[in-house]
Amino acid sequence: MLFYFSRRKFKGQVSSHGGTHYLRIVSLAGDKQNGQFINQDQWASEVVKAADNAGVMVFVHGYNTSNAEFVERLVKVDHAFRVAGFKGVVIGYEWPSNDDFLKYKDDRAAAIDAAPHLIKDGLLLLSEKDPELKISLLGHSMGAFVITEAFARVGTIPINGIFRPIVDKAVFVAADIETNKLRKKRRASRAIHIGCNRLVHYHCNTDRVLDLSGKIINIGTKRSGRHGIVGNKSTRITDIDCTAYYKRRYKSKGQDRLLWSHNWYFDDAWFSRNVVDVLMNKHPPQKQS
């Protein structure tokens, strides 16, 4: 069974937790999935039980994502990770994206507003339920930005009186974050070191969506999910260049559509195995070719 928590407003549903909803995903006829609202404590208990001492991976989606698209991607990530050998539970955090390609700035504002709730209404809740629970994060595109903002705005929170990173590993894929913000001692870099024990960052310089984000939407900046992390040699950060692999596996075969160049990771068995290796404390190569 899958679970997620959401800051989206749902018609006919009133949250008793400051605007955050807690859901389990149930299967309907065929492949259709639907969310079932449950209370906060029941949700946390069921997630911890489903983790079965093997950890929790929290997926955070990117911009221009509807609820249906988010659930579909969450189901896909869960299936891929299980095939790759992940024994824990995959859950999701949904922030209220506008589901509109032209509303990038609105989505970014919504991401900033929703970021603290990733920790306050989700990660902290699970950690209090089981202080030994190993929590990891997977942020795609603007979802990686949400994670850095969450770390920056909430900081370190004591769990049972002990100050420590609430997240074991954070995985960024196709991150829509300005490269300069991840330089050593910059705000995003400091936030990551506060919030997690290790960051694994996947980038590919053929990402056409991040090319548009950097050159047009964000006025000539470079995005880390396309250009990689520069100016930061922290031993707690691993930056994996997927460019050669993508060119050989997809571009050389004509499979290089705009959205595919940004989202291909979730349909790729190598990527899923690599992330699961990270979660199992294996060390991936710096470059995949």
Image (cartoon, rainbow, N blue to C red):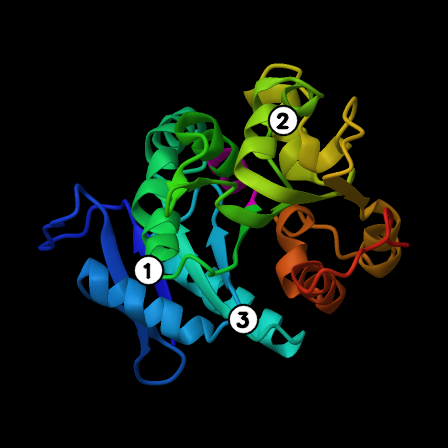
Task: Give the residue type that dot 1 points to.
Answer: Lys
Q: Nearer the viewer, mark 2 or mark 3?
A: 3
Instruction: Name the mark nearer the viewer: 1 or 2.
Output: 1
Q: Is residue 96 visible?
A: no
Residue 201, located in which quarter of the rendered image?
A: top right
Quarter placement of the N terminus: bottom left
Instruction: Look at the numbered disc 2 and give the secondary structure of its residue.
Output: helix
Q: Is residue 194 left or right of residue 63?
A: right
The answer to which of marks 2 and 3 sits earlier in the sequence is 3
Amino acid at dot 3: Ala
Which label was assigned to residue 54? 3
217 versus 122 height, above or below: above
Marks 3 and 1, Cα distance to the nearest angstrom? Answer: 15 Å
**Pointers 1 and 2 in contact (C-beta within 8 Å):** no
Q: Which residue is mark 2?
A: 189
Q: Residue furthest top?
A: 219
Q: Is residue 227 above or below residue 99?
A: above
Q: At label 2, which amino acid type do we have?
A: Ser
Which region is colored magenta?
A: 140-146
> Whole-percent x and y of residue 177?
60, 29
Q: Secondary structure at mark 3?
A: loop
Mark nearer the N terminus (3 vs 1):
3
The location of residue 206, given as percent across then percent down, is: 77, 40
**Label 1 sits on residue:** 129
Q: Residue at x 19, y 43 (%)?
A: 19
Which mark is first along the chain, 2 or 1?
1
Residue sitting at x 22%, y 67%: 42
